[in-house]
Image: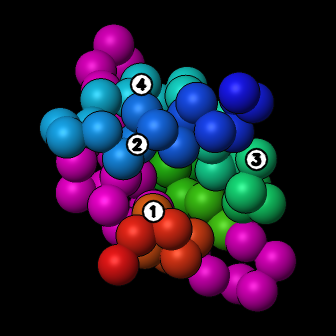
Amino acid sequence: MSKKEKLLLKMRAKPPEISFGEFESFMELYGWTRHRQKGSHVIFLNEAGAMLTVPLKHGKMVKRTYIILALKQLGLES
């Protein structure tokens, strides 16, 4: 199983639990780049210009809401 598949399984788990570092790796594997950070929020962009803002809390997991938004943006979740 590839890294991409493992991260996707973690994000689809109920409830999803993924660290910000894993989330960032996942987004990069799907073609998104970390555009900039403003305060505690990181902004990811893809080639089409779509944007996703995710709060960065050191030592904490990414909240379920942002994981679901990311999966929907990537077309991996309905």
Q: Earlier in the sequence, mark 1 or mark 3?
A: 3
Q: Amino acid at mark 4?
A: Ser
Q: Which residue is mark 1?
A: 70
Q: Residues within 10 Å of mark 2 (few under 14, many from 20)?
A: many
Q: Which residue is mark 3?
A: 29
How far apart are labels 1 and 4 at the CA level?
14 Å
Residue mark closest to the camera, 2 vs 1: 2
Q: Residue at x 32, y 61 (%)?
A: 68
Identify the secondary structure beneath mark 1: helix
In front here: 60 or 29? 29
Q: Which residue is mark 4?
A: 19
What segment carries the magenta color?
46-70
Q: Which residue is mark 2?
A: 11
Position of 70 relative to 3 (above/below): below
How far apart are labels 2 and 1 at the CA level?
9 Å
Q: Residue at x 71, y 27 (%)?
A: 1
Q: Earlier in the sequence, mark 2 or mark 1?
A: 2
Residue with the most extreme left position? 15
How far apart are labels 4 and 3 at the CA level?
15 Å
| Residue 8 percent coordinates (x, y) | 53, 43
Asked whether residue 66 appears in the rendered view, the answer is yes
Left/right placement of residue 58 relative to residue 42 reads: left
Q: Are marks 2 and 1 in contact (CB under 8 Å)?
A: yes
| Residue 71 percent coordinates (x, y) | 45, 63
Task: Residue 67: say if magenta.
Answer: yes
Left/right placement of residue 12 relative to residue 6 reads: left
Q: Amino acid at mark 3?
A: Leu
How far apart are labels 4 and 2 at the CA level?
10 Å
| Residue 72 percent coordinates (x, y) | 43, 73
Q: Are marks 1 and 4 in contact (CB under 8 Å)?
A: no
